[in-house]
Image (cartoon, rainbow, N blue to C red):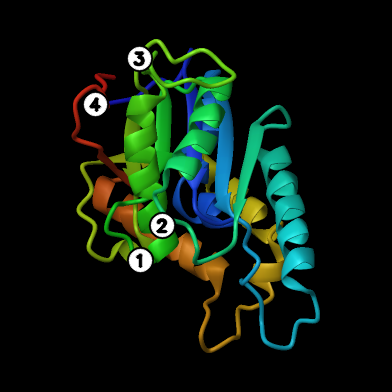
């Protein structure tokens, strides 16, 4: 079985600057290889993701992490679209203002498929991102919602990505990303501010975590490496492939 992304427009809406690499970069790489247009929207600044001894101010760190996202995306697709909503970490909520901002992104990029976080994920910013995506994926196609870009012709399909270590997540399906595992690792290494925190007791070795999860999901689905997803089972957000 093989899913073909050709002709699609795939947008990952992630809470933090390095969430893409951990959860769905392999799928975006596969979509790009198939000929899809790909992009990422990062909801939060990443301004609080630092070790206590780091001298960078939150504002400096937020700018650094935006640059890390851009450097990583260049490895996947130099033409990939990149959007930043710049909400401070741990302050994201499903508000009308945030919905409006994300609606502008949707109507500008015009996705046919949106990949976001699991609605019961461990981090409050992940859960809020999922809530905003669920709401905005509908209203972005509503002609009654005004914005600077025309409404989508129909709501995009929505997939929810795996949780870190798969905790509390029951996959509906898996994507074989075996040819792209090394690319995921190279992309993650662009996030130097976070990779450098591997020895922190309150953090984790992100590259080890990435590889273990991809190989574990791969072993469940009969391939070398995989990413796991759920459909968003809501009207007009489910697509046949």
Q: N-terminal of the two: label 2 or label 4?
A: 2
Q: Nearer the viewer, residue 139 or 186?
A: 139
Q: Are marks 3 and 2 in contact (CB under 8 Å)?
A: no
Residue with the mark numbered 3: 154
Q: Which mark is residue 238?
A: 4
| SS category of the residue bearing label 1 | helix
Which mark is nearer the camera, 3 or 4? Answer: 3
How far is mark 3 from mark 2, CA to CA? 25 Å
Which residue: 59% across, 62% down?
Answer: 88
How far is mark 2 from mark 4, CA to CA? 21 Å
How far is mark 3 from mark 4, CA to CA? 12 Å
Q: Nearer the viewer, residue 34 or 114?
A: 114
- State whether residue 225 appears in this view: no
Q: Are marks 2 and 1 in contact (CB under 8 Å)?
A: no
How far is mark 4 from mark 1, CA to CA? 25 Å
| SS category of the residue bearing label 3 | loop
- Horizontal relation, residue 218 to residue 88: left or right: left
Residue with the mark numbered 1: 165
Which mark is nearer the camera, 2 or 4? Answer: 2
Which residue: 39% across, 43% down?
Answer: 132
Residue with the mark numbered 2: 126
Which mark is nearer the camera, 4 or 1? Answer: 4
Q: N-terminal of the two: label 3 or label 4?
A: 3
How far is mark 2 from mark 1, CA to CA? 15 Å
Q: N-terminal of the two: label 4 or label 1?
A: 1
* Residue 35 vertical placement versus 161 (above, below): above
């Amino acid at each position: 079985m093989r899913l073909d992304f050709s002709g699609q427009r795939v947008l990952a809406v992630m809470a933090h600057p390095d969430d893409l690499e951990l959860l769905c970069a392999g799928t975006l790489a596969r979509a790009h290889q198939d000929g899809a247009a790909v992009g990422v929207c990062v909801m939060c600044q990443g301004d609080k993701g630092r070790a206590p001894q780091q001298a960078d101010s939150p504002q400096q760190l937020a700018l650094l992490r935006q640059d890390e996202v851009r450097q990583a995306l260049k490895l996947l697709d130099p033409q990939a679209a990149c959007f930043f909503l710049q909400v401070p970490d741990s302050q994201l909520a499903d508000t009308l203002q945030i919905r409006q901002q994300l609606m502008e992104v949707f109507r500008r990029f015009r996705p046919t498929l949106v990949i976001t976080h699991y609605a019961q994920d461990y981090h409050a910013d992940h859960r809020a991102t999922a809530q905003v995506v669920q709401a905005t994926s509908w209203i972005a196609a509503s002609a009654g919602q005004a914005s600077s870009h025309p409404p989508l012709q129909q709501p995009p399909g929505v997939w929810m990505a795996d949780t870190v270590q798969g905790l509390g997540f029951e996959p509906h399906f898996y994507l074989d990303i075996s040819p792209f595992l090394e690319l995921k690792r190279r992309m993650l290494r662009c996030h130097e501010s976070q990779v450098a925190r591997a020895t922190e007791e309150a953090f984790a070795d992100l590259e080890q975590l990435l590889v273990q999860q991809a190989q574990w999901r791969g072993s469940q689905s009969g391939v070398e490496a995989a990413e796991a997803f759920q459909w968003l089972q809501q009207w007009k957000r489910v697509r046949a492939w």
